[in-house]
Image (spheres, helix red, strand yellow):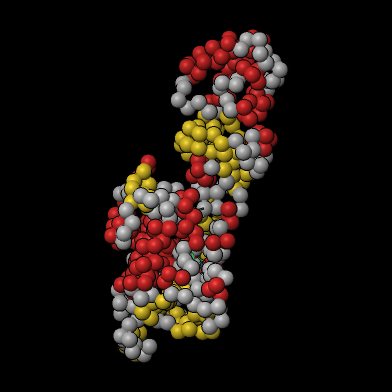
Amino acid sequence: MIWKKYGKSMMFMKNQENKIKVCVIGGGPAGMMAAITAAENGASVTLFEKNKSQKQMESERFFDNAYLGKKLLITGKGRCNVTNDCSLDEFMKNVPVGAKFMYASFSAFTPQDVMNFFENGGTPLKVERGNRVFPVSDKSIDILRVLKRKLFENNVKVINRKVCDVIVRDGVFCSVVAEGMGELFFDRCIVATGGASYPQTGSDGDGYRFSEKLGHTVKEIKPSLVPLVSHDKACRDMMGLSLKNVTLSVIDNKKNKVIFKEMGEMLFTHFGMSGPLVLSASSHMRDMEEGRYSVSIDLKPSLDEKTLDARLLSDFNKFINKNMDNAMAELLPSKMIVPFLNKCGIKKEQKPNSLTKQERRTILETLKNFRIDILGFRPVDEAIITSGGVSLKEISPSTMESKIVKNLYFAGEVVDVDAYTGGFNLQIAFSTARLAGINAAQYI
Ligand SMILES: Cc1cc2nc3c(=O)[nH]c(=O)nc-3n(C[C@H](O)[C@H](O)[C@H](O)COP(=O)(O)OP(=O)(O)OC[C@H]3O[C@@H](n4cnc5c(N)ncnc54)[C@H](O)[C@@H]3O)c2cc1C
């Protein structure tokens, strides 16, 4: 690359291949999309991904053998909820951190654009409940295949090596140091190293370390979409029990306010609670501290209090000579009955006909409001999403270029944007990557 100075601004002159040389760090959805876009826009692109299979240890591979998108493959339980077929307004409501920042990139590459990208690439999609978009095949590999094919068609060079360092000279990106390859020079660099969750997939926070070293502020890393820890003995007693079609509400005890309410599926574990409903609920608990949040489970959301009371009377009448744990058998899963009665302060040996009116009222209220206090989150490596990351104040939202280091760009989860479940996080990865790829390939 030849440099020429024009006053204060730097001008790129075309290199021998007539192309800007872009390197992308990270072969996740953001890195792959950024690499494809930069190449489509005329750049010569090299994509570094640190994951490698044993065979690939010996040499770099190209296209089919490239080891990419390890996390992408496990998204949506292997089905990949690739985006959400929603409007800009709807998207903004689902991005609790960084919605305003996302405006430009979302507008540049909308969910419809993402859907066209994959469908035109040969993977038909379908829209499910809540506008969640999945491949018709229900296989995330079909999403990865499109990305890999486009990398190949656009001559992106894939190197399965870890980038150990990013080097900047005089405030301008200069080179990267890749494992076993030394210092390699490029004109532009896109950091798409992901967050810090599920580190076994390769995203273990390298991007945060590079960015801090280069002078960026990294907002505190916290787990989001993560299982919840509770010391309530009921959780341990019900370990392994999965509840379907219950309504879970989150109560902010400090504000005495319900901040989340949704119906779905959840699971009790040895540490507390997990499952889709709990993960979604966790992303609304923004100021986690002991005692701050409780959850309330409506175990019978389709029955109002009057109908439920009639049902209780009928069941207790039917099982009049049985113990309470038997009398509840048609109302609750067996694993839940004793912990439930403990919460109500009712002995399992008690007979239904000895219940006081107040005790029956307590059972009714507990069925509608099974309360569990939350102690905290499980660690970030168990989270679906990392909340926090490179500060948005230091990135241009219209180009994704660093405001601190020239020719350095960011894409995907490494930046301080995060969203609720529903395909919004992959949309963030694709939109930011598209914008970073377009701009990193531009001559100035
Ligand atoms: C279990 C699970 C299920 C999920 N399901 C969904 C879903 O259905 N829908 C949805 O929208 N979101 C989902 N997500 C979130 C989604 O996977 C992420 O938002 C998305 O993968 C972020 O993309 P990314 O490219 O920024 O980062 P990543 O996918 O984390 O990719 C980053 C890549 O960079 C590589 N890398 C890191 N450091 C280096 C380095 N130094 N050198 C070279 N390479 C490096 C990593 O190995 C990794 O491959 C899920 C997440 C998890 C954990």
Image quadrant in which the C terminus is located: bottom left
The quarter in which the N terminus is drawn is bottom left
Residue at image x 58%, y 28%? 333
Q: Is residue 308 above or below residue 31?
A: above
Is residue 252 left or right of 237 when viewed as pictured? left
**Above or below — where is 47 with respect to 304?**
below
Q: Quadrant of residue 153?
A: bottom left
* Up-down relation of residue 312 to residue 207 (above or below): above
Residue drawn 39% across the image and 67% down it: 148
| Residue at 57% over, 46% down | 227
Pick the front one: 2 or 157: 157
Where is residue 111? Give x, y as percent. 32, 54
How many marks can you see? 0
Q: Position of residue 213 (x, y in %)?
A: 55, 74
Any part of residue 1 in sight: yes
**Residue at the (58%, 9%) spot, across then down:** 317
Question: In this picture, is 357 found above or below 276?
Answer: above
Q: In this view, does 422 lie to the left or right of 355?
A: left
Left or right: 142 as drawn, with respect to 360: left
Residue 358 seen from this side? no
* Residue 122 percent coordinates (x, y): 31, 59
Residue closest to the eye, 21 or 372: 21
Q: Where is residue 208 in the image (x, y as percent from the top left)?
A: 53, 67
